[in-house]
Amino acid sequence: MYKEDTIAAIATPVGEGGVGIVRVSGPEAERIAKGIFARSGGRNGRLRSHTLHYGAIREPRSGEIVDEVLLAVMRKPRSYTGEDVVEVHCHGGPFVVRRVLELVLSCGARHAEPGEFTKRAFLNGRLDLAQAEAVLDLIRARTDKGMRLALDQVEGGLSRWVGELREELLDILVQIEAAIDFPEEEIELLAREQLANKIGSLREKLAGLIASYEWGRLFREGARVCIGGRPNVGKSSLLNALLGEERVIVTPEPGTTRDVIEESINLGGLPVVLWDTAGIRESSDQVERIGVDFALRRVEAAEAVMVVLDGSFSLTSEDRFIMGVVKGKKGLAVVNKSDLPQCLDLQEARSLLDGKTVLSVSAKSGQGLDKLRHHLRALLLGVQQEPAVAITNVRHKAALERTEKSLGEAAEALTRRLPAEIVAVDLQEAREGLEEVVGMVTNEDILERIFSQFCIGK
Ligand SMILES: Nc1nc2c(ncn2[C@@H]2O[C@H](COP(=O)(O)OP(=O)(O)OP(=O)(O)O)[C@@H](O)[C@H]2O)c(=O)[nH]1
Ligand SMILES: [Mg+2]
């Protein structure tokens, strides 16, 4: 499962940069570094750990200088992987960095697989699995809020919480197992009730954690919102206004937008992808018809829709059709063009909107946009109250759901006065679910799936 060899990879992105870093980890890291690195001003000696050394990388046979570098040595166990780690900080040209990597490989290192450094960190106990997974979230975070959630998990926020739940569970398990060891002391009725209550409170905490998934997932992956409506109501203008730039073509001509236009905005830390679509109407134009088809599909695929209506016009049959299409779907109604005299029958619109919030805005003047952002964020997140700890990972959610289910079965077995052995089996299953989250029990397949998502060099 764990090969004790030395791995190397470029740790910085491809392309030009201030510095490029080649990372080497494993028992041979220092020997390899010494073979190609010469400190400025002479003798190499023993390189101090956790210190940057200035010098040059040389081609070992010809002695030709490849680059002037800073070399960092981090001896085990105080390194990212928990092994001896050497990092070569070169000038950040793609050619230079590649050349240094090739030298390192020619001295006996193996090219690292995606996520292999982080995998070693996990296998060496530097990080638990939930923390390792959060490293990936951290790299991929798209807003500062997403970043903070990931960082909290890297630092062990979730792991601590799961650890506490596990302790509570072990307490209960000890009592049940005592009853197995001393069968003559059948669990008293009162004790059964107390244990069932404890399990109940544990289940509640788990349920809260499971419910936080949707919230956490949105911050991690973002939400997709479709802007839909009949032609000319101002969908593209609304997208431009929310973006704060003239991204999409706007004309007084109905049927301007044909393709789906995709742009991202940041709603108080929540990454949101907005889709501007073709105005929905019957059309004899082939291109427009395809656009309308695309629009309807995006309305379906989005997590939420913003139905745009033109406040300066009465409702049309096309408006009514669209409001029918989005019935039952999460969404808002945006009555646009509030800067013009209003003709829209709001009461009728409301009656067709199955309780969706109706907001009046002007894409032209910007009136009402802040309120729209606020409502859209609340609609997407569903809850106003920020959970104390949030899970963002579907693997964690599945493991916690299994735990919760097993606890339910244990509680039921207790109240039905089934033998302690049966209760214990359910509780053991619950414990395994919790341990899976942090990787105390795991298998190679799971690890493979997790770490293959990382980039090489991480
Ligand atoms: N007065 C006023 N005019 C607006 C407002 N929003 C959009 N318009 C005008 O309405 C017309 C249509 O705007 P678009 O944004 O292209 O409308 P659309 O819904 O994207 O139209 P299609 O792409 O054809 O479906 C343009 O002339 C805009 O300038 C607004 O808030 N106030
Ligand atoms: Mg448009």
Image (cartoon, rainbow, N blue to C red):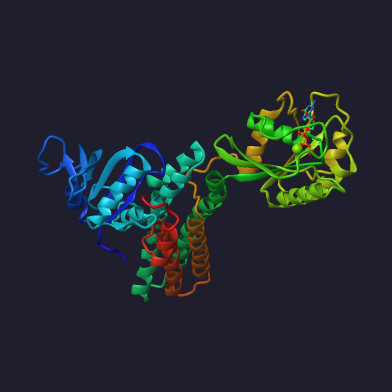
Q: Position of residue 139 (x, y in %)?
A: 44, 45
Q: Quadrant of the N terminus?
A: bottom left
Query: Dividing the image into four equal quarters, which quarter contains ligand 2?
Result: top right
Tell me if 410 is positioned left or right of 104 in this view.
Answer: right
Query: Residue 338: x percent and y percent?
Result: 79, 26
Where residue 346 sits: x, y (%)? 85, 34
Residue in the image at 49% along x and 58% along y: 395
At x 84%, y 47%, the residue is: 285
Is residue 184 left or right of 249 when viewed as pictured?
left
Q: Is residue 382 among the parts visible in the rendering? A: no
Horizontal side of 111 relative to 355 (left or right) equals left
Viewer-nearest residue: 253 or 59:
59
Vertical order, 30 against 439 (above or below): above
Using the image as rendered, state which of residue 129 and residue 429 is in the foreground: 129
Q: Position of residue 418 (x, y in %)?
A: 49, 74
* Residue 62 in sight: yes
